[in-house]
Amino acid sequence: MNDDKLTASGKIMKDKHVRRWIEQFSEQMTVRLEKRRKLEEMGSNPYKNDVKPNTTFEYLNHRYEPYSKEEIGETPRYHVAARVLMIRDFGKAAFLQCDDGTGRFQLYVNKQVTSEKGFAEYKLLDYGDIVYCEGDVFKTMKGELALNARELTIVTKSIRPLPEKFHGLTDQELKYRMRYVDMIMNPETRDKLRKRSEIIRYIREHFYKADFLEVETPMMHSIAGGAAARPFRTHHNALNMELFMRIAPELHLKRLIVGGYNKVFEMNRCFRNEGLSLKHNPEFTSIEFYWAYATYHDLMDFTEALLTGISRDVLKTDIVRFGTHDINLRGPYARLTMREAVAKFTGSAMEQVNDRSHLLGLLKTTSLDQKKLAATSWGKLLVHCFEELVEAQLIQPTFITEYPTEVSPLSRRNDQNPEFVDRFEFFMNGWEVANAFSELNNPTDQLDRFADQALAKEAGDDEASDVDYDFVRALEYGMPPTAGQGIGIDRLVMILTDSHTIRDVILFPLLKKEHFFPDEE
């Protein structure tokens, strides 16, 4: 063990876990620890908590960029705090390229101008440190904006060096595992994730303006229900009972409709114990909302208004580019029944789509098990045709309606044709983004469908649910006619920000456990 590292760290570390961590410090980190010690000897706390910036780099760039060196003239003294990303040292002077979270700017340190204490602290500065600076704005001979540092102090000493200065963090695994470094080095990452927050804020405001009530429902359920998915399991010690992390808030939200709230929504976290992919993360965000005395047709209008509003007020454009596709969010959006979509995109006539043998013929070109398909019902064959042959072609915003009843256990049967339910799914970029129903409120029908799910679970379907008798009881008290919908926030943000993996729009995506020490592997 190198005692210099321990001494420089501030005190002798005797705990085995701390010693184990510190003994892996690089030579560069040891040098930084020594600089921290020197700051302390100067009487400067390397982790200050008493600085107050009075402006941002975003403001300074906006305020002064349009003007020439002469036009800027004398400016007020500005106070800024930012992280140093690059140091160009000239001995008695230096330019510091900095980022304060709103933009980038440079600080000019000069022994003749900067206070004696400030220049002494500059000599202990490393890139990655956070500094506080007071000074006035000017333009260099090259026409670059800078802040002439009258005072400078290190606010936070960075012990661990940032990645290579000019190229930033490029390793994809490290980008997601060390998101904090990714955000420091790549402003576009911060911008994209900020855009996600702006989209979510707009969605919430859209619901508030429509008089929806935002609610919070349980994240641990005694019965996994509300969707067909494999749940995460946990155990409550005090109650000695098995619980499930929620796969959907649907059944609790509909209980609130029974209780008298006519418009409710929840921006929720859901958990599904399924695989990882470019479009799936086991922990994800969606918004679910329920609207009494509305139908799924009302929800199509509401969804279209929501998305056109996002494009107008948040994205400031009607056209978003995803890869090679230009997606027009202006509206009106296409509305097709599933049968119409299969007919249109496979070149079939409508009467052919109603023919089971024709659907089997269409599916011969797919990788699906042909023997299993031969024993599959017409409704499920229709869904297979849609998913395999049509879905990927729905690039422009499109509502698909009239789903077969057998694949929609929580939806209301259509009054004119009970083989279908009053349901739509909304697609963009070939992806499902939203799912909506006119809700089932007949308790007898609901109990029958729960029973079918329970039988499927007993037969080995680990995505099927048990019977939720309390929910049936709630329906027996009477739920008004209601329409409900869920929108996948992560997937929507992916499309709107041209992100080709869900990990790019989640702050901290799920990753395999990291091993910090060789003997952990």
Image: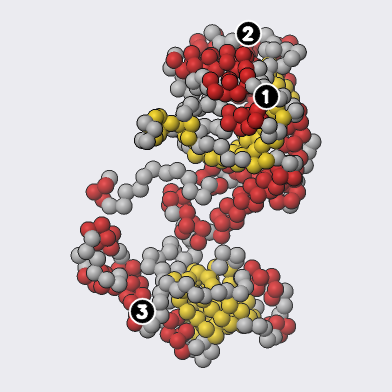
Secondary structure under tag 2 reads helix
Left or right of 164, for residue 259: right
Mark number, residue 479: 1
- Picture quadrant of residue 3: bottom left
Front position among marks 3 and 2: 3
Mark 2 in CB contact with mark 1 (< 8 angstroms) = no
Q: Which amino acid type is shown beneath numbered disc 1?
A: Met
Q: In the image, what residue type sits under mark 3?
A: Glu
**Disc number placed over residue 40 in the picture, else none:** 3
Inspect this view and state whether residue 346 appears: no
Q: Is residue 439 visible?
A: yes
Q: Could you say where residue 81 lies in the image, as x and y percent from the top left?
A: 54, 72
Residue at image position (64%, 47%) is 200
Q: Which residue of the protein is positioned furthest toward the bottom in this rendering?
A: 112
Between circles 2 and 1, the one closer to the viewer is: 1
Query: Is residue 224 toward the left or the right of residue 43 in the image?
Result: right
State yes or no: discs 3 and 1 in contact (Cβ < 8 Å): no
Q: Decide: is 304 above or below 375.
A: below
Find the residue positioned furthest to the left: 1
Gap in angstroms between the C-alphas marked 3 and 2: 82 Å
- Could you tell me residue 177's position as x and y percent? 43, 50
Residue 480 position in % (x across, y down): 71, 25
Q: Considering only order in the chain, which callout, 2 or 3, is on the residue closer to the N terminus?
A: 3
Q: Which of the two discs, 2 and 1, labels the residue nearer the N terminus?
A: 2
Image color mode:
secondary structure
**Looking at the picture, does residue 232 appear above or below residue 162?**
above
| Distance from Cα at disc 2 to Cα at disc 1 | 40 Å
Q: Earlier in the sequence, mark 3 or mark 1?
A: 3
Q: Nearer the viewer, residue 469 or 246?
A: 469
